[in-house]
Amino acid sequence: MSSVSAQHARVLSGMRPTGRLHLGHYHGVLKNWLELQHEYECFFFVADWHALTTHYDDPTGIPNSTREMVIDWLAAGLNPGSATIFVQSRVPEHAELHLLLSMMTPLGWLERVPTYKDQQERLKERDLATYGFLGYPLLQSADILVYKAGQVPVGEDQVAHVELTREVARRFNHLYGREPGFEERAEDAKRKMGKKNAKLFDTHKRRYQEQGDGEALEIARALVEGQGNLTVADRERLLGYLEGGGRVILPEPQPLLTKASRMPGLDGQKMSKSYNNTIALRDSPAVVEKALRTMPTDPARVRRTDAGDPQKCPVWQFHQVYSNDAVRDWVQTGCRSAGIGCLECKQPIIDGVLAELLPMQARAVEYEAQPELVRSVLNEGCERAREVARETLDEVRHAMSLVMA
């Protein structure tokens, strides 16, 4: 991967607008975002164009779903002072880069993305024989590349999408990165490093290109990225020169693997609105308590005096998320000996979930009462995102000779 240090530290992630979020979203995505916003330069976006790939026949609910989802993001603790929060469709550069990339991306690359056929099988009731659905992984690539994001937080099932993005970036750089006089410009950039650093760069460049020495490559990259007097273009030329290619216009991102969420639904399956087994982040305490009190337990425990097996009970999965070792030991012993009843077993879960949701719900009430504040957050985020995206598109257009002299 070739990129400057600022791009290495940039993270991009998005969510389709699904309306109000539930605990599965919080534990599966948002908790990770809350940590990342303090460690990286983060761009988090509402993927409303992606929603059209499967819901193009009725997009009327997307604006309201967007607003409700962003309220939950903010209530959960996403800070617009620490991360750029924006809406995909308000940054048209995503669409332009998607279009330009589509001109050079082989059809077979899109057809072999694993989720393409999986989704078609899973959503048989929808007509997904559209160009938009085939091309949505390339739109994802454009989302990433337009910000030159160095890291993309994904689960293992999404790594193939990042790999496609890497291939697309590699192909683009191969086709358009050989600017006229590239080697001369790279040599000029190298001279700006000073004689000593330029000599070190040449030594490590030769070791990498002639011997495939990966350590030499990393040292040379660090040397380039540590030069404060180089322009972004100079750095990219030197990094491309180092790896034997041209100028790196679109850096290749890396997957930032996230832990799989352990948050189950009320029935033990994955928490999902389609399974009707969710607890929404803004459900009232009474609704949350009722949902947890009535959730199914080990079917072997018909009577209070029957012994049970926590491994066969959905409640145990909640204890894995919300309880400490002492409480889990109490559950294991009490359930297997019929020393505790199912309602007793559920009480620590009820307390834990309510304690987690209470501060979020208090913040959500404030945002619900101030719709102009939510609009302001998105307006500022979209403006910031467009500034970055415009810079990338300017480079892309010049590289493709789409700008008149």
Image: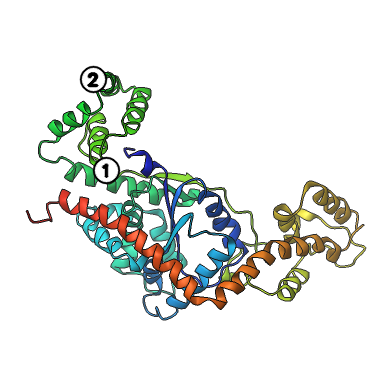
Q: From this viewpoint, is residue 31 visible?
A: yes
Residue positioned 86% across, 56% down in the render: 335
Residue positioned 37% across, 39% down in the render: 5
Residue positioned 51% across, 49% down in the render: 36
Residue with the mark numbered 1: 170
Residue at mark 2 to residue at mark 1: CA–CA distance: 31 Å
Picture quarter containing residue 47?
bottom left
Q: Secondary structure at mark 1?
A: helix
Compared with residue 14, is residue 35 higher up or lower down, i.e. above or below? above
Residue positioned 74% across, 60% down in the render: 352
- On residue 403, the disc is none
Q: Secondary structure at mark 2?
A: helix
Q: Position of residue 350 (x, y in %)?
A: 76, 65
Residue with the mark numbered 2: 195
Q: How is the image coloured?
A: rainbow
Foreground pick, 91 / 400: 91
Crowdedness of circle 1 by 10 Å Cα count: few (<14), some, many (20+)? some
Specify which label sits upstream in the sequence, 2 or 1: 1
Compared with residue 300, is residue 240 higher up or lower down, i.e. above or below? above
